[in-house]
Image (spheres, coloured by chain):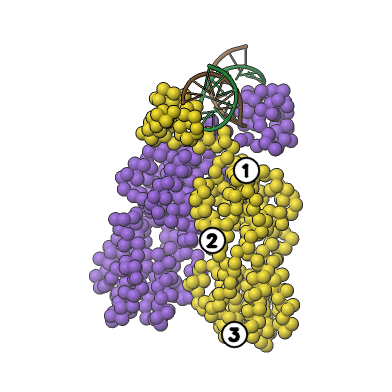
Chain colours: A yellow, B purple, C green, D brown
Amino acid sequence: MKVTSKQIAELCGVTRGTVDRALNNRPGINEATREKIMKVAGELGYRPHFLAQSLVKGETKTLGVVLFDVYNRIFSQLFHSFEAEARRHGYFVYLVLTNKDKALEMEYINNLLDRKVDGIALSPVNMGTTFNTFLKQSGVPIVTFANRVSAKVPFVWIDDKQAMKTAVHHIGSKGYKRILYVSPPLRYKGKSNIYVPEQRHQGFLEACAELPDIRYTVITDHDYMESMLQLIAESDEKPAILCSSDIYALDMMRFLKANHIRVPEQAGIMGFDNIDILHYVDPALTTIDFHVDEIGRIAAEQLIASIQGRDIPQRTNVAYSIIERDSL
Amino acid sequence: MKVTSKQIAELCGVTRGTVDRALNNRPGINEATREKIMKVAGELGYRPHFLAQSLVKGETKTLGVVLFDVYNRIFSQLFHSFEAEARRHGYFVYLVLTNKDKALEMEYINNLLDRKVDGIALSPVNMGTTFNTFLKQSGVPIVTFANRVSAKVPFVWIDDKQAMKTAVHHIGSKGYKRILYVSPPLRYKGKSNIYVPEQRHQGFLEACAELPDIRYTVITDHDYMESMLQLIAESDEKPAILCSSDIYALDMMRFLKANHIRVPEQAGIMGFDNIDILHYVDPALTTIDFHVDEIGRIAAEQLIASIQGRDIPQRTNVAYSIIERDSL
DNA sequence: CTGTTAGCGCTTTCAG
DNA sequence: CTGAAAGCGCTAACAG
């Protein structure tokens, strides 16, 4: 079953060193013996023992990917392109899911390091200098997405702040004077790493500052649905509900429908992410699209470049664009 | 950075064998020296070298999971529970995606075997005796789901045939006399492994045979949407559209809506799988639910049991149930 | 109770 | 051009 280089050596009447030279076409070997060895190896279906190889070479050709989850379409898509790119370069991928559990994230990263992955791609939950130095000390290249750890750890994503500003200006241009900004993750400020929601929030605030005739409310309550009804009722103008992610927008639409508030007649609504299931919802949701598979691909590419000792940018933004549909 | 057992041995003035005994609390060691060794190891932040360990022990505590993709919610959910269960048992998971590419599937399985995974969980695309013996010869335990390879490879799923029969009877009990059965995968019959779609199809046919007053049409065309319109137009009775998976049902609903056919007034529609995004669609889709996370959990559990040398069933069915909503 | 030795399968010197 | 030997870091069998 399991044929080793030693057996091939014996069969060919040479030593393992020579077999190794043949198999890894290293110089300094007679062409005739090389061919013979290759032939025997082929016939026996020889496959090198990866673990032994890794042990001695100190590299595993394996990348670790740490994600919040894979429910969110964004991450499924991201992972698909990441995995494809990694494979193109001969790398394998460990996927672990943290469910945004900080302790679990630490445990998993340690496990990945134990397994001597060559690099780690991470959507971080942890934050702060402790975590930061922990990553630094890990000794392997790291890239992040979906959340940033620090300006020193390479980050591939979009310019969330600018994108959200664009969204607000778009809403303004549609004549809305009242915006309800929904972003539940903001509640975790200080407790968890919410870099991306914060960036979007900042973009929102900055844009509002630029548009003086717009009144806004930021909603982060757990039961933001309820507060929403009140706010809509109190408002004398038709509000635009701007959500920091499509998933909240979808929940909101469901909720509004249940409460007989019609979109976009009584309230406009806009999401962010353009997840693919928007395909199936009605009315079609206006949102911000970005090429998440580009992010996955670039992250893999950069991680591998970094492993190979090349320099990679500390920050890479992919393009985004407004997808105008029927909900606003 | 990297502290080895050898260093600890030197620091403690003992030999590596003793260190090993302490670290893996094996019997036959003085309590005092053990404590000393543990203390030093702790201070130095010793972590065993996983590769070296695996090499000598012949086990990697790693499972390979081969999925079609992770776009389909079914697989995301399945993977989540699989991964969680594996972790509970101290196993790590390699996730690879085949996108239903047969050659890629083979390549990936070989790669996983090279990496000496302890077991493989697989949603197979390949089929036939060649593939079957290939899996047998791999030397590692295997479990399958989402598609069966053969009666000899353990399979965890649901009783698709029976479930589909139940669905048909349910439709019959609602007074429908005409059923359009939509199952695009059936087109790949003979070309790809479509065990599950075939089972569902058979269940459909058997149930129809039991209900003589029902007329039915099976649709597998690529552009099944178009054929659908004709069939609905030709039909003098309100038809029920039964889809072999929710995704087709969703596409169908979208299509019907675009063509101003109202559900369930002009046509009933029923899906299968109860994927979580149904949450967001309107009208709510009647479907068949089964606990896919149970499948993931059981698959991991059985795979690990099998690795540990225990016997596992060749077939495990989890429960299913009809979820009656508004579309039928 | 602890040390010694051998070995997992491969790579990489250094001689010859 | 090829052989011999050492070593990656750990475990396991056998002595003492």
**Residue that numbered label 2 is attached to:** A293
Marks 3/2 in contact by CB < 8 Å: the verdict is no
Query: Same subunit under labels 3 and 2?
Result: yes
Numbered disc total: 3
Q: Position of residue B236 (x, y in %)?
A: 28, 81
Residue at image position (29%, 75%) is B177
Q: Please identify, in this view, whether the residue under mark 3 or under mark 1 is nearer the observer.
A: 1
Which structural element holds mark 1?
Answer: helix
Q: Earlier in the sequence, mark 3 or mark 1?
A: 1
Q: Which residue is mark 1?
A: A113
**Nearer-the-camera pick, B197 or A4:** A4
State which chain disc 3 sits on: A
Task: State how far apart marks 2 and 1 are (Cα).
Answer: 26 Å
Quadrant including the C terminus of chain B? bottom left
Q: Which comes before the other along the chain, label 3 or label 2?
A: 3
Give me the C-alpha separation between circle 3 and circle 2: 35 Å
Is residue A235 shown left or right of residue B255?
Answer: right
The correct choice, above or below, for A213 with respect to B175 in the image is below
Alpha-carbon neighbours of circle 1 within 10 Å: few (<14), some, or many (≥20)? Answer: many
Question: Residue at horizontal 44%, vertical 23%?
Answer: A14
Q: Are marks 2 and 1 on the same chain?
A: yes
Q: Are both tags, 3 and 1, on one chain?
A: yes
Crowd around label 3: few <14 · some 14–19 · many ≥20 (10 Å): some
Q: Is residue B164 above or below residue B138?
A: below
Crowdedness near tag 2: few (<14), some (14–19) or many (≥20) residues, C-alpha within 10 Å = some
Q: Tell me if residue B160 comes above or below residue C1 in the rendering.
A: below
Residue at horizontal 53 percent and vertical 63 percent from the top: A73
Q: Determine which of the numbered discs, if any, sits on residue B226 in the image.
A: none
Residue that badge 3 annotates: A266
x and y, in percent, of residue A56 in the image: 57, 33
Closer to the chain start, of discs 2 and 1, is 1
- Please state which amino acid type lies under the numbered disc 2: Asp
